[in-house]
Amino acid sequence: VDTSITLSDTWAAMEGLVHKGLVKTIGVSNFEVEEIQGLLKTATIFPTVNQVESHVYWSQTRLRDWCQSNNIVFEAYAPLGSPDRNSGEASPIDDHAVQTVAKAHKKTPAQVLLRWGLQRDHVIIP
């Protein structure tokens, strides 16, 4: 790993791809608000998207709100939960409340969890 290459260097190279017409947009993944703010100190192109894990057990509300207020798409992966994340905890898909809502609305738990993300204006990657 070449530690002399900074995030700003990498972002500038990605911006170069936009200027050359090789890509239309660029984004980030797993960035917190402060990391995006740091990137924006030198960036000339705002990230279009921030792809992060988000589900009912990890809503990331502060990050989502900040992204939305800055016109950055909040793209949620693992909307059904990440079972390896918290070993010993139930997965959201097995959550009693999710199961109850699903049964009441004649939907599957997965449908309930996906709808939760959609209602929060997430772009979802199931």
Image (tube, rainbow, N blue to C red):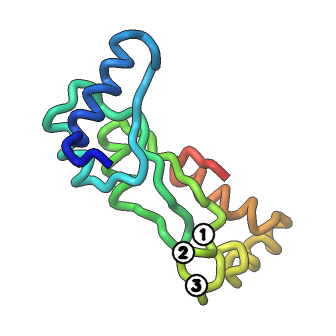
Sort mark 2 into few (<14), some (14-19) or many (20+) by Cα contacts within 10 Å.
few
Residue 31 screen position, x and y as percent = 34, 52
| 1 or 3: tag closer to the N-terminus | 1
Q: Would you say 50 lies left or right of 118 here?
A: left
> Badges 1 and 3: C-beta atoms under 8 Å apart?
no
- State the CA–CA distance, disc 1 to disc 3: 9 Å
Q: Would you say 62 lies left or right of 22 here?
A: left
Residue reaching furthest to the right: 106
Residue 74 screen position, x and y as percent = 45, 46
Task: Report helix, strand or loop for mark 1.
Answer: loop
Question: Which three-letter amino acid code belongs to the residue tagged 3?
Answer: Ser
| Residue hosting label 2 | 85
- State the CA–CA distance, disc 2 to disc 1: 5 Å
- In front of the other: 12 or 88: 12
Which residue is at 60% across, 89% downward?
Answer: 88
Task: Report helix, strand or loop for mark 3.
Answer: loop
Which residue is at 73% across, 73% downward?
Answer: 101
Residue reaching furthest to the bottom: 88
Residue 82, labelled with which disc?
A: 1
Residue 102 screen position, x and y as percent = 77, 70
Question: Which three-letter amino acid code belongs to the residue tagged 2?
Answer: Arg
Which residue is at 27% across, 45% downward?
Answer: 2
- In front of the other: 116 or 104: 116
Task: Report helix, strand or loop for mark 2.
Answer: loop
| Residue hosting label 3 | 87
> Badges 2 and 1: C-beta atoms under 8 Å apart?
yes
Residue 93 screen position, x and y as percent = 71, 73
Sort mark 3 into few (<14), some (14-19) or many (20+) by Cα contacts within 10 Å.
few
- In front of the other: 82 or 97: 82
- State the CA–CA distance, disc 3 to disc 2: 6 Å
